[in-house]
Amino acid sequence: MPETSQTPIQLPTSQDVDKETARRNRQLTLAITLASIVFIALTVLAIYGLTRNADTTQNIRDIFIIFMALESLIIGAALVVLIIQIASLINLLNNEIKPILDATNETIATLRGTTEFLSENMVEPVLKLNSYLAGLQKMLELIGLKK
């Protein structure tokens, strides 16, 4: 039977993991730095462009105010829908889930009473009978009547 050579699986060492983490940290730092530079440059260009012409600045301001008003209306509508959904959830919890939980608790109490009753009235007498029979059997073995 020919032997097959298997190469062991190489797990990454802690140095490899540290190098990979350092590389990812450098990439993340570079991306954040570039994004910050681009944001600052766009802000400076916007400020420069807005200070050049007052009419353009007023038009852009008015358009921005209109968009903010529309956004406020949309957020207000979303809040109304959210409040209605929360009221519906509270109604569901009070009128449907609570009765189910109450019925479940009642059923558990009934089962607990049933198991206590069965334990007292069936299991204990059977255990006593078995212990008496085991004692009788042992006594018969000691007397020699049973092997």
Image: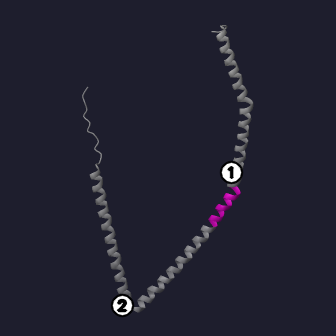
Residue range corresponding to the magenta coloring: 84-96
What quarter of the picture does the N terminus occupy?
Answer: top left
Residue at coordinates 71% horizontally, 51% vertically from top-left?
102
Within the image, what quadrant is residue 133 found in?
top right
In-front residue for pair 111/2? 111
Q: Give how far across and how far down residue 8 sits, in percent.
A: 27, 39
Of the numbered discs in the image, which one, if any, rests on residue 141? Answer: none
Q: What is the three-letter code of the residue carrying label 1?
A: Leu
Q: What is the three-letter code of the residue carrying label 2?
A: Arg
- Mark 2, Cα crowd under 10 Å, few <14 / some 14-19 / many 20+, is few
| Side of 146 where 44 appears, left or right | left
Examine the structure image and report whether residue 87 is included in the region drawn in magenta.
yes
The residue indicated by pointer 2 is: 52
In-front residue for pair 39/106? 106
Residue at coordinates 69% horizontally, 58% vertically from top-left?
94
The residue indicated by pointer 1 is: 101
Examine the structure image and report whether residue 4 is included in the region drawn in magenta.
no
